[in-house]
Image (spheres, rainbow, N blue to C red):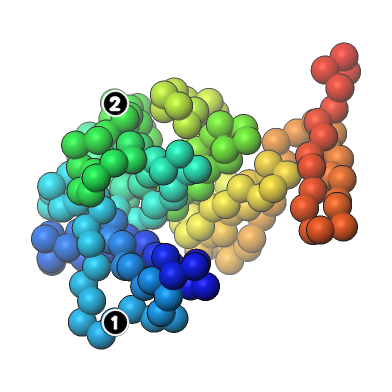
């Protein structure tokens, strides 16, 4: 945080022409409100992991410090749709925990998000609009659904719904995981999610 003097901002550089800057970059703002003029940041992932065929488009970090990145390529043989990197000393190029299968048609990773409570990571495919969902621990395939086309952003909300935004219909859509859920709100603004009892089908 800025108040704590340890504020950081992370961004993904997808520069097609400057492969030396491609990847995940951290800017240490400390207690400042903005980065210092001329600050080029610290390369957290890349450029060694991303070559000319890799276009990182999004990144999410879990509470353990591990990173999930999406790669925007039409041909899945050129780059995995999602790569998980373990926490450690930057750059993390050699800390790959898993990648999505390149043989199966997992491609077009434009955006992604994680749901730590459910142990899921999902990405939105820019080309066909499919949302593909994987296990956070080992990258195994969980499932997917057609959310439209030209996916631009995806997010899990606190109740486990997936929110998608596409560039074709220009809609934000909310997709439910199914089942009955209640949320109990506290006076401090927090809430707990209570799934249906396991005795019900």
Quarter occupied by residue 34: bottom left
Position of residue 66 measured from the top left corner of the image (x, y, whole percent): 39, 40
Q: Tell whether label 2 touches label 1 (CB within 8 Å).
A: no
* 38 relative position to 20: left or right: right
Give me the disc on residue 103.
2
Residue 193 versus residue 188 in the image, above or below: above
Position of residue 42 measured from the top left corner of the image (x, y, whole percent): 23, 62
Nearer the N terminus, badge 1 or badge 2?
1
Residue corresponding to mark 1: 36
Single out the mark in the foreground, 1 or 2: 1
Residue 114 visible within the image: yes
Distance between mark 1 and mark 2 Cα atoms? 44 Å
Disc 2, SS: loop
Residue that appears at 51% across and 57% down: 153
Depth check: 162 or 135 in front?
135
Quarter occupied by residue 88: top left
Crowding at mark 2 (Cα within 10 Å: few <14, some 14-19, many 20+): few
């Amino acid at each position: 945080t800025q108040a704590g003097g340890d504020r950081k901002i992370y961004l993904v550089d997808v520069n097609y022409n400057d492969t030396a800057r491609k990847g995940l970059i951290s800017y240490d703002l400390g207690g400042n409100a903005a980065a210092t003029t001329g600050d080029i940041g610290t390369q957290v992932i890349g450029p060694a992991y991303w070559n000319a065929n890799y276009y990182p488009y999004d990144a999410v970090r879990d509470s353990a410090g591990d990173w999930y990145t999406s790669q925007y390529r039409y041909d899945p043989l050129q780059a995995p749709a999602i790569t998980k990197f373990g926490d450690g000393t930057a750059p993390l190029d050699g800390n790959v925990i898993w990648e999505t299968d390149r043989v199966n048609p997992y491609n077009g990773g434009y955006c992604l998000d994680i749901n730590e409570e459910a142990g899921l990571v999902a990405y939105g495919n820019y080309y066909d609009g499919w949302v593909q969902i994987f296990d956070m621990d080992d990258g195994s395939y969980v499932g997917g659904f057609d959310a439209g086309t030209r996916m631009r952003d995806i997010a899990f909300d606190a109740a486990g719904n997936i929110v998608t935004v596409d560039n074709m219909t220009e809609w934000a859509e909310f997709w439910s995981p199914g089942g009955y859920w209640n949320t109990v709100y506290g006076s401090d603004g927090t809430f707990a999610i209570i799934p249906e009892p396991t005795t019900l089908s």
